[in-house]
Image: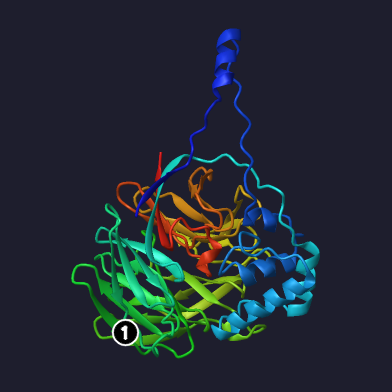
Amino acid sequence: MRRDRWLPPFSFPLVSLLLAACSGAPPVPAPAPAEPPRSSDYIAALPEGEIRRQVILGCTPCHQLGTPAAHKQTLEEWRAAIARMKQIDDHLDLALIQLEAEPLAQWLAKHARMPAQGRTVQTASADIREYPAGPKSGFYHDMALAGGKAWLADYFGNKLYGIDTGTGTVESYDIPVNVPAGKPGGAHQIDTTRDGMLWITFTKSEQVMRFDPRTKTFRVYDGFEKGGNVQYFVVDADRNVYQDERGGIWMTHFSREILSRLDPKTGKITVHKTPRTAHMKEKGVHLYAAVADSKGRLWYTETHGNRFGMLDPRTDKAWEVDMPEKYVGPKRLAIDKDDVLWIPELATGKITVYDTRRRKIVDRLTLPIPGDFPYAIRRNPHTGDLWVTGSGSDSLYRLDPKTKKIAIYRLPRTGAYTRTVSFAENGDIWTNYASFPNTHTRMPFEAGVVVRLRPR
């Protein structure tokens, strides 16, 4: 089943046109329709400060806050919800919620309220199409394009899905994860190397896999640090999985302050340590995403550690610097051809711009929708512009790196939480609804969903 979705163009009511024609006056635009309240509106209504930022850091790595499924009013409701979330956090060994349960419940009961309606913003026009794949109960963290298909992997269901970008036809493959039956392999990042191979990290089975879209075969790589949670591949300025001069592939670990290098030919893995964040437990630092500059240096973020840093593989030395404010939550960053970092701040809705050649912050941008939390920034290799996930506002942003102008593209679902963006040569922009639980998004299908956005 396939459906085309379009964002409505701006229009004038017929009566306005008729009156204008009779009077000679220009037509008067109709008032913009009231927007539904979104997660960004909910967060914008919370008191600014360290607690708000820590709430965002603890909750929004999984799902939106406030809507559509997180309405809570009383202290008892918040106590029950936080206990449930902490249980999931402990079960998956994520260490995301770092505030004490009772003070957090009291603060939310006092301050957390859903506004009556959402903020109206000027949006850019696009044709949007949604494709179903996999069960609705699944969790699909990422998507990528390869071999004429959009690919999703189910974190809990251990299946890979390929959606034909023309017909919407879906094919599926069992993923050979090394876990007991019924347990999650933890499929996390999906991206491609320049040769069109699909690469996937698995946070729970501690594996990395290469999938060939032509032969439909997996190659499995084991031997990573136990309990490290293999997280993200290092990517380059063209949004490909980075390969160093000897073909090595690098990845971060969510629960350790290390990066690992994998030799795809031999399967050899080497571990490279980064500086200890001494005031925190190691698994709570969350060394998150990383990019490679033109000299092969690896720049990474520590989301809860509130730092970013650089590892030079030639010397095996690393250094780190604090973000400009406390608890901003640097997340899934991008790098451009001038070796400039674009670092999304999950907890502030800002973007830190850091020139790696001059070793200084050169700008700090604010997203146009208050209360939004940007999970990721991806660079379009075909145009050079940057796309930001408006993970709390059901939006994608296009950022011109030269003018710093930001356009808003609204997605057609409430709760449309996104974590990544992929780019086709024809100009299409791709993403997927990636909330956990998936049901926090008002899905158009009883399935996971991949989204194609075609700017007009």
Residue 446 or 103: which is nearer the viewer? 446
Quarter of the N terminus within the rendering: bottom left
Quadrant of the rendering where the C terminus is positioned = top left
Residue, far left: 215
Colour mapping: rainbow
Q: Is residue 32 left or right of residue 112?
A: left
In percent of width and height, residue 261 lies at: 37, 81
Question: In this rendering, is residue 340 above or below 311?
Answer: above
Is residue 156 in view from this perspective? yes
How many discs mark residues in the rendered view? 1
Mark 1 neighbour density, 10 Å: few (under 14) some (14–19) many (20 or more): some
Q: Is residue 92 left or right of residue 207?
A: right
Residue visible at 61% across and 37% down in the picture? 33
Residue closer to the observer: 81 or 404: 81
Q: Is residue 233 visible?
A: no
Give the residue drawn at x 61%, y 47%. 368
Picture layout, residue 428 above or below residue 298: above
Q: Nearer the viewer, residue 319 or 176?
A: 176
Identify which residue is drawn at 53% across, 76% down: 287
Identity, as a three-letter code, of the amino acid under mark 1: Tyr
Residue 118 % position (x, y): 66, 47
Q: Is 111 left, or right, of 306 in this rendering?
A: right
Percent across and percent down for residue 154 are: 40, 73
**Left or right: 350 as drawn, with respect to 356:** right
Location of residue 233 by image quarter: bottom left
Which residue is identified by label 1?
Answer: 221
Q: Secondary structure at mark 1?
A: strand
Counting from the top left corner in percent of width and height, residue 285 is at: 59, 79
293 in relation to 368, above or below: below
Q: Quadrant of residue 213?
A: bottom left
